[in-house]
Image (cartoon, rainbow, N blue to C red):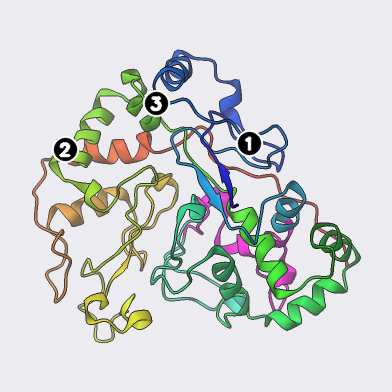
Protein backbone atom coordinates (compact mmCIF):
# COMPACT_ATOMS: atom_id res chain seq x y z
CA UNK A 1 0.00 0.00 0.00
CA UNK A 2 1.25 3.55 -0.72
CA UNK A 3 1.98 5.84 2.20
CA UNK A 4 -0.75 8.44 2.68
CA UNK A 5 -0.11 11.51 4.80
CA UNK A 6 -3.05 13.61 5.93
CA UNK A 7 -3.54 17.25 6.83
CA UNK A 8 -2.25 18.64 10.11
CA UNK A 9 -2.06 22.04 11.76
CA UNK A 10 1.71 21.91 12.14
CA UNK A 11 4.70 21.05 9.97
CA UNK A 12 7.42 18.77 11.28
CA UNK A 13 10.74 20.46 12.06
CA UNK A 14 12.78 17.24 12.26
CA UNK A 15 14.47 18.04 8.94
CA UNK A 16 15.26 21.65 9.71
CA UNK A 17 11.98 23.16 8.52
CA UNK A 18 10.90 26.25 10.37
CA UNK A 19 7.62 25.76 12.21
CA UNK A 20 6.39 29.19 13.31
CA UNK A 21 2.82 27.93 13.43
CA UNK A 22 3.67 25.84 16.47
CA UNK A 23 4.07 29.02 18.53
CA UNK A 24 0.87 30.67 17.36
CA UNK A 25 -1.95 30.39 19.86
CA UNK A 26 -4.46 32.83 18.53
CA UNK A 27 -8.16 32.61 17.93
CA UNK A 28 -7.79 31.75 14.25
CA UNK A 29 -6.03 28.48 15.00
CA UNK A 30 -8.49 27.67 17.78
CA UNK A 31 -11.52 28.34 15.57
CA UNK A 32 -10.05 26.33 12.70
CA UNK A 33 -9.19 23.41 14.97
CA UNK A 34 -12.68 23.33 16.44
CA UNK A 35 -14.20 23.36 12.96
CA UNK A 36 -11.96 20.50 11.93
CA UNK A 37 -12.94 18.47 14.97
CA UNK A 38 -16.64 19.08 14.41
CA UNK A 39 -16.96 19.09 10.62
CA UNK A 40 -14.02 17.21 9.13
CA UNK A 41 -11.94 15.16 11.57
CA UNK A 42 -8.45 14.43 10.30
CA UNK A 43 -6.42 11.27 10.69
CA UNK A 44 -3.23 12.41 12.37
CA UNK A 45 0.09 10.94 11.27
CA UNK A 46 1.76 8.47 13.60
CA UNK A 47 4.40 9.85 15.95
CA UNK A 48 7.27 8.35 13.96
CA UNK A 49 5.99 9.41 10.54
CA UNK A 50 8.50 11.61 8.68
CA UNK A 51 5.91 14.07 7.40
CA UNK A 52 2.72 15.85 8.36
CA UNK A 53 0.68 17.79 5.84
CA UNK A 54 0.00 21.49 6.58
CA UNK A 55 -3.55 22.51 7.33
CA UNK A 56 -5.57 23.16 4.18
CA UNK A 57 -3.84 20.65 1.92
CA UNK A 58 -5.12 17.24 0.89
CA UNK A 59 -3.65 13.90 1.80
CA UNK A 60 -0.33 13.25 0.07
CA UNK A 61 0.19 9.84 -1.49
CA UNK A 62 3.75 8.54 -1.79
CA UNK A 63 4.77 5.91 -4.39
CA UNK A 64 4.84 2.34 -3.17
CA UNK A 65 8.37 1.82 -4.46
CA UNK A 66 9.76 4.93 -2.73
CA UNK A 67 8.38 5.12 0.83
CA UNK A 68 9.40 8.03 3.03
CA UNK A 69 11.73 7.72 5.98
CA UNK A 70 13.58 10.25 8.10
CA UNK A 71 16.98 8.91 7.02
CA UNK A 72 16.04 9.01 3.33
CA UNK A 73 14.78 12.59 3.61
CA UNK A 74 18.00 13.68 5.33
CA UNK A 75 20.05 12.06 2.58
CA UNK A 76 17.89 13.70 -0.09
CA UNK A 77 18.28 17.08 1.58
CA UNK A 78 22.08 16.77 1.55
CA UNK A 79 22.05 15.82 -2.14
CA UNK A 80 19.71 18.73 -2.92
CA UNK A 81 22.16 21.30 -1.52
CA UNK A 82 25.38 19.61 -2.71
CA UNK A 83 27.17 21.33 -5.62
CA UNK A 84 29.08 18.11 -6.27
CA UNK A 85 26.01 16.94 -8.16
CA UNK A 86 27.06 19.25 -11.01
CA UNK A 87 29.85 18.75 -13.53
CA UNK A 88 32.09 21.57 -12.25
CA UNK A 89 31.03 21.55 -8.57
CA UNK A 90 29.39 25.00 -8.87
CA UNK A 91 25.65 24.28 -9.06
CA UNK A 92 23.24 22.38 -6.83
CA UNK A 93 19.51 21.76 -7.08
CA UNK A 94 19.14 24.64 -4.59
CA UNK A 95 20.91 27.02 -6.97
CA UNK A 96 17.76 27.20 -9.08
CA UNK A 97 15.32 26.15 -6.36
CA UNK A 98 16.38 28.46 -3.54
CA UNK A 99 14.25 28.37 -0.37
CA UNK A 100 14.50 32.13 0.16
CA UNK A 101 13.30 32.73 -3.43
CA UNK A 102 10.09 30.72 -3.16
CA UNK A 103 11.96 27.55 -4.14
CA UNK A 104 12.58 29.19 -7.53
CA UNK A 105 15.55 31.48 -8.30
CA UNK A 106 14.15 35.01 -8.50
CA UNK A 107 15.41 35.38 -12.07
CA UNK A 108 13.68 35.37 -15.42
CA UNK A 109 15.25 32.06 -16.48
CA UNK A 110 17.40 29.31 -15.00
CA UNK A 111 21.19 29.67 -14.84
CA UNK A 112 23.35 26.55 -14.88
CA UNK A 113 27.03 25.62 -14.98
CA UNK A 114 29.34 28.13 -16.62
CA UNK A 115 26.63 30.77 -16.40
CA UNK A 116 24.62 29.06 -19.13
CA UNK A 117 21.12 30.51 -19.37
CA UNK A 118 18.02 28.43 -19.90
CA UNK A 119 14.94 29.50 -21.81
CA UNK A 120 12.25 29.17 -19.13
CA UNK A 121 11.51 30.51 -15.67
CA UNK A 122 12.27 28.06 -12.86
CA UNK A 123 9.01 26.52 -11.54
CA UNK A 124 8.66 26.48 -7.77
CA UNK A 125 8.99 23.13 -6.00
CA UNK A 126 6.38 24.09 -3.41
CA UNK A 127 3.73 21.34 -3.17
CA UNK A 128 5.35 19.50 -6.09
CA UNK A 129 4.40 16.24 -4.40
CA UNK A 130 0.80 16.82 -5.48
CA UNK A 131 1.65 17.12 -9.16
CA UNK A 132 1.24 14.38 -11.75
CA UNK A 133 3.34 15.93 -14.52
CA UNK A 134 6.46 18.03 -14.16
CA UNK A 135 8.25 20.87 -15.93
CA UNK A 136 6.36 23.57 -17.81
CA UNK A 137 5.72 21.11 -20.66
CA UNK A 138 4.90 18.09 -18.48
CA UNK A 139 7.60 15.88 -19.98
CA UNK A 140 8.27 14.03 -16.70
CA UNK A 141 5.54 11.94 -15.10
CA UNK A 142 7.08 11.50 -11.64
CA UNK A 143 9.17 13.47 -9.18
CA UNK A 144 11.85 10.82 -9.51
CA UNK A 145 12.09 11.50 -13.25
CA UNK A 146 11.95 15.26 -12.68
CA UNK A 147 14.92 15.43 -10.31
CA UNK A 148 17.15 13.43 -12.67
CA UNK A 149 16.69 15.64 -15.72
CA UNK A 150 18.45 18.82 -14.44
CA UNK A 151 21.44 16.79 -13.23
CA UNK A 152 22.16 15.46 -16.70
CA UNK A 153 21.03 18.53 -18.67
CA UNK A 154 24.17 20.14 -20.20
CA UNK A 155 22.74 23.64 -19.65
CA UNK A 156 21.89 23.04 -15.99
CA UNK A 157 24.14 20.69 -13.98
CA UNK A 158 25.75 18.78 -16.85
CA UNK A 159 26.73 15.56 -15.06
CA UNK A 160 25.79 12.11 -16.47
CA UNK A 161 24.26 9.90 -13.79
CA UNK A 162 26.96 7.25 -14.21
CA UNK A 163 29.62 9.80 -13.30
CA UNK A 164 27.55 11.08 -10.38
CA UNK A 165 27.21 7.53 -9.04
CA UNK A 166 30.98 7.06 -9.11
CA UNK A 167 31.51 10.45 -7.48
CA UNK A 168 29.13 9.80 -4.58
CA UNK A 169 30.39 6.29 -3.96
CA UNK A 170 33.89 7.72 -3.46
CA UNK A 171 32.65 9.87 -0.55
CA UNK A 172 32.68 7.92 2.72
CA UNK A 173 29.78 9.82 4.27
CA UNK A 174 27.50 9.17 1.30
CA UNK A 175 28.57 5.50 1.09
CA UNK A 176 27.56 5.08 4.72
CA UNK A 177 24.19 6.81 4.27
CA UNK A 178 23.22 4.97 1.09
CA UNK A 179 24.08 1.72 2.86
CA UNK A 180 21.91 2.72 5.81
CA UNK A 181 18.94 3.86 3.72
CA UNK A 182 19.05 1.47 0.77
CA UNK A 183 21.25 -1.37 2.02
CA UNK A 184 23.70 -0.75 -0.82
CA UNK A 185 25.76 1.80 -2.73
CA UNK A 186 24.46 4.82 -4.63
CA UNK A 187 22.75 4.06 -7.94
CA UNK A 188 20.85 6.36 -10.32
CA UNK A 189 17.53 5.07 -8.98
CA UNK A 190 18.50 5.50 -5.33
CA UNK A 191 19.83 9.02 -5.91
CA UNK A 192 16.59 10.14 -7.55
CA UNK A 193 14.48 8.42 -4.91
CA UNK A 194 16.27 10.26 -2.11
CA UNK A 195 16.03 13.62 -3.89
CA UNK A 196 12.34 13.13 -4.76
CA UNK A 197 11.58 12.16 -1.16
CA UNK A 198 13.05 15.43 0.10
CA UNK A 199 11.16 17.48 -2.52
CA UNK A 200 7.90 15.89 -1.33
CA UNK A 201 8.44 17.57 2.04
CA UNK A 202 8.49 21.09 0.53
CA UNK A 203 4.90 21.93 1.43
CA UNK A 204 2.98 25.12 2.04
CA UNK A 205 -0.51 25.38 3.46
CA UNK A 206 -1.90 26.84 6.70
CA UNK A 207 -2.30 30.22 4.99
CA UNK A 208 -4.88 32.90 5.87
CA UNK A 209 -7.03 31.61 2.99
CA UNK A 210 -7.21 28.15 4.58
CA UNK A 211 -8.45 29.56 7.87
CA UNK A 212 -10.91 31.85 6.09
CA UNK A 213 -12.25 28.86 4.17
CA UNK A 214 -12.58 26.97 7.46
CA UNK A 215 -14.85 29.69 8.81
CA UNK A 216 -12.58 32.27 10.40
CA UNK A 217 -13.70 35.41 8.59
CA UNK A 218 -11.11 37.52 10.38
CA UNK A 219 -8.29 35.57 8.73
CA UNK A 220 -8.49 37.81 5.65
CA UNK A 221 -8.57 41.60 5.68
CA UNK A 222 -11.52 43.35 3.98
CA UNK A 223 -9.34 44.04 0.92
CA UNK A 224 -8.21 40.42 0.76
CA UNK A 225 -11.82 39.25 1.10
CA UNK A 226 -12.82 41.45 -1.82
CA UNK A 227 -9.87 40.04 -3.77
CA UNK A 228 -11.01 36.53 -2.85
CA UNK A 229 -14.38 37.26 -4.42
CA UNK A 230 -12.75 38.69 -7.56
CA UNK A 231 -10.58 35.57 -7.81
CA UNK A 232 -13.35 33.01 -7.40
CA UNK A 233 -16.31 34.83 -8.95
CA UNK A 234 -15.78 38.04 -10.89
CA UNK A 235 -12.60 37.01 -12.75
CA UNK A 236 -13.04 33.23 -12.35
CA UNK A 237 -9.30 32.66 -11.89
CA UNK A 238 -10.29 29.39 -10.23
CA UNK A 239 -11.21 27.95 -13.63
CA UNK A 240 -7.52 27.01 -13.91
CA UNK A 241 -6.16 27.76 -10.43
CA UNK A 242 -8.43 25.49 -8.45
CA UNK A 243 -8.29 23.07 -5.56
CA UNK A 244 -6.12 23.28 -2.42
CA UNK A 245 -2.97 23.67 -4.54
CA UNK A 246 -4.52 26.34 -6.79
CA UNK A 247 -3.80 24.53 -10.06
CA UNK A 248 -5.73 22.22 -12.35
CA UNK A 249 -2.48 20.50 -13.36
CA UNK A 250 -3.41 21.02 -17.00
CA UNK A 251 -1.79 22.84 -19.93
CA UNK A 252 -3.10 26.06 -21.46
CA UNK A 253 -2.02 28.34 -24.27
CA UNK A 254 -2.10 31.92 -22.95
CA UNK A 255 -0.54 33.36 -26.10
CA UNK A 256 2.66 34.12 -24.17
CA UNK A 257 5.56 34.34 -26.61
CA UNK A 258 3.57 32.97 -29.54
CA UNK A 259 4.11 36.19 -31.49
CA UNK A 260 7.87 35.52 -31.67
CA UNK A 261 9.58 34.28 -34.88
CA UNK A 262 10.54 31.02 -33.13
CA UNK A 263 8.14 30.62 -30.21
CA UNK A 264 8.50 28.10 -27.41
CA UNK A 265 5.91 25.46 -28.37
CA UNK A 266 5.58 24.06 -24.86
CA UNK A 267 3.53 20.90 -24.43
CA UNK A 268 3.39 20.36 -28.20
CA UNK A 269 7.05 19.29 -28.25
CA UNK A 270 6.12 16.43 -25.90
CA UNK A 271 2.80 15.28 -27.37
CA UNK A 272 2.96 16.51 -31.00
CA UNK A 273 -0.73 17.28 -30.59
CA UNK A 274 -1.65 20.52 -32.36
CA UNK A 275 -4.02 21.37 -29.53
CA UNK A 276 -0.98 21.55 -27.24
CA UNK A 277 0.94 24.04 -29.36
CA UNK A 278 2.08 26.86 -27.06
CA UNK A 279 0.46 25.29 -23.99
CA UNK A 280 2.16 25.33 -20.59
CA UNK A 281 1.26 23.88 -17.21
CA UNK A 282 -0.81 25.88 -14.77
CA UNK A 283 1.47 26.73 -11.82
CA UNK A 284 0.44 26.60 -8.19
CA UNK A 285 -0.41 29.97 -6.64
CA UNK A 286 0.70 28.93 -3.16
CA UNK A 287 3.39 31.40 -1.99
CA UNK A 288 3.00 33.24 -5.32
CA UNK A 289 4.27 36.49 -3.77
CA UNK A 290 7.66 34.84 -3.26
CA UNK A 291 8.14 33.36 -6.75
CA UNK A 292 8.45 36.39 -9.05
CA UNK A 293 8.94 36.86 -11.95
CA UNK A 294 5.96 35.19 -13.58
CA UNK A 295 4.89 33.11 -16.61
CA UNK A 296 6.93 30.34 -18.22
CA UNK A 297 9.32 32.89 -19.72
CA UNK A 298 9.46 35.10 -16.62
CA UNK A 299 8.30 38.18 -18.51
CA UNK A 300 6.18 39.77 -15.77
CA UNK A 301 8.04 41.21 -12.80
CA UNK A 302 5.07 41.74 -10.49
CA UNK A 303 1.67 40.28 -9.72
CA UNK A 304 0.19 43.61 -10.74
CA UNK A 305 1.65 43.04 -14.22
CA UNK A 306 0.06 39.58 -14.35
CA UNK A 307 -3.36 40.89 -13.30
CA UNK A 308 -3.16 43.69 -15.89
CA UNK A 309 -2.34 41.12 -18.59
CA UNK A 310 -5.37 38.98 -17.79
CA UNK A 311 -7.65 41.99 -17.39
CA UNK A 312 -6.78 42.99 -20.97
CA UNK A 313 -7.63 39.48 -22.19
CA UNK A 314 -4.08 38.26 -22.76
CA UNK A 315 -2.75 37.91 -26.29
CA UNK A 316 -5.00 37.11 -29.21
CA UNK A 317 -2.90 34.47 -30.97
CA UNK A 318 -3.81 31.20 -32.73
CA UNK A 319 -4.83 28.42 -30.36
CA UNK A 320 -5.18 30.73 -27.34
CA UNK A 321 -7.19 28.99 -24.62
CA UNK A 322 -10.90 29.83 -24.71
CA UNK A 323 -10.85 30.60 -20.99
CA UNK A 324 -8.80 33.73 -21.69
CA UNK A 325 -11.15 36.61 -22.35
CA UNK A 326 -10.98 40.34 -21.78
CA UNK A 327 -12.54 41.21 -18.43
CA UNK A 328 -11.79 44.83 -17.59
CA UNK A 329 -11.38 45.08 -13.84
CA UNK A 330 -11.51 48.35 -11.95
CA UNK A 331 -8.33 49.61 -10.33
CA UNK A 332 -9.81 48.70 -6.94
CA UNK A 333 -10.59 45.16 -8.08
CA UNK A 334 -7.07 44.71 -9.44
CA UNK A 335 -5.54 45.96 -6.20
CA UNK A 336 -7.79 43.73 -4.10
CA UNK A 337 -6.98 40.69 -6.25
CA UNK A 338 -3.26 41.28 -5.81
CA UNK A 339 -3.79 41.65 -2.06
CA UNK A 340 -5.57 38.29 -1.90
CA UNK A 341 -2.79 36.58 -3.85
CA UNK A 342 -0.05 38.14 -1.74
CA UNK A 343 -1.60 37.90 1.70
CA UNK A 344 -4.15 35.11 1.44
CA UNK A 345 -1.80 32.51 -0.04
CA UNK A 346 1.35 33.34 1.91
CA UNK A 347 1.84 31.06 4.89
CA UNK A 348 3.44 31.69 8.26
CA UNK A 349 4.45 28.03 7.99
CA UNK A 350 6.55 28.62 4.87
CA UNK A 351 9.04 25.75 4.39
CA UNK A 352 12.33 27.43 5.22
CA UNK A 353 15.23 25.04 5.79
CA UNK A 354 18.53 25.01 7.58
CA UNK A 355 21.47 24.18 5.34
CA UNK A 356 22.64 20.60 5.91
CA UNK A 357 26.16 19.57 6.82
CA UNK A 358 27.54 17.79 3.75
CA UNK A 359 29.86 14.75 3.82
CA UNK A 360 33.48 15.61 3.09
CA UNK A 361 35.39 14.15 0.16
Q: Mark 3 vs mark 2: which is more N-terminal?
A: 3
Q: Looking at the picture, how far across and down is residue 316, in whole percent?
A: 11, 69
What mark, if any, has residue 211 been given in the picture? 3
Query: Could you tell whether 226 is left or right of 36 in the image?
Result: left
Q: Pointer 1: what residue?
A: 18
Other residues around mark 1 within 10 Å, as few (<14) / some (14–19) / many (≥20): some
Q: Which of the pair 80/91 is nearer the observer?
A: 80
Q: Which of the pair 159/333 is nearer the observer?
A: 159
Q: Looking at the picture, how far across and down is residue 357, in whole percent?
A: 80, 52
Question: Residue 107 in magenta?
Answer: no
Circle nearer the viewer, 2 or 1 = 1
- Check the image and report above or below for 305 versus 297: above
Q: Residue at x 39, y 52 (%)?
A: 284
The answer to whether the residue labelled 3 contacts the one labelled 1, judged by CB atoms less than 8 Å apart, is no
Q: Pointer 2: what residue?
A: 333
Q: What element does badge 2 sit on? A: helix
Query: Could you tell whether 148 is left or right of 211 in the image?
Result: right
Q: Mark 3 vs mark 1: which is more N-terminal?
A: 1
The answer to whether the residue labelled 3 contacts the one labelled 2, judged by CB atoms less than 8 Å apart, is no
Residue 345 image-quadrant placement: top left
Amino acid sequence: MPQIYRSDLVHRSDLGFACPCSSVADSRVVVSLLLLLIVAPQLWAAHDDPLRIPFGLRALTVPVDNPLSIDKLRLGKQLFFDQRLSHDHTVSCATCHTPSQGWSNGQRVATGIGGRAGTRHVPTLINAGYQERFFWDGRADSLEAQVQSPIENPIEMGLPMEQLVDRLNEIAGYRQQFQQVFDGKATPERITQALASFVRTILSGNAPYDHFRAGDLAALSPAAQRGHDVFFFRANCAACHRGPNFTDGQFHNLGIGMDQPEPDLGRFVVTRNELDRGAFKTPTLREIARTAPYMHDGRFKTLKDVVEHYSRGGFNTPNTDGLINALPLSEQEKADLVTFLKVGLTSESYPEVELPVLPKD
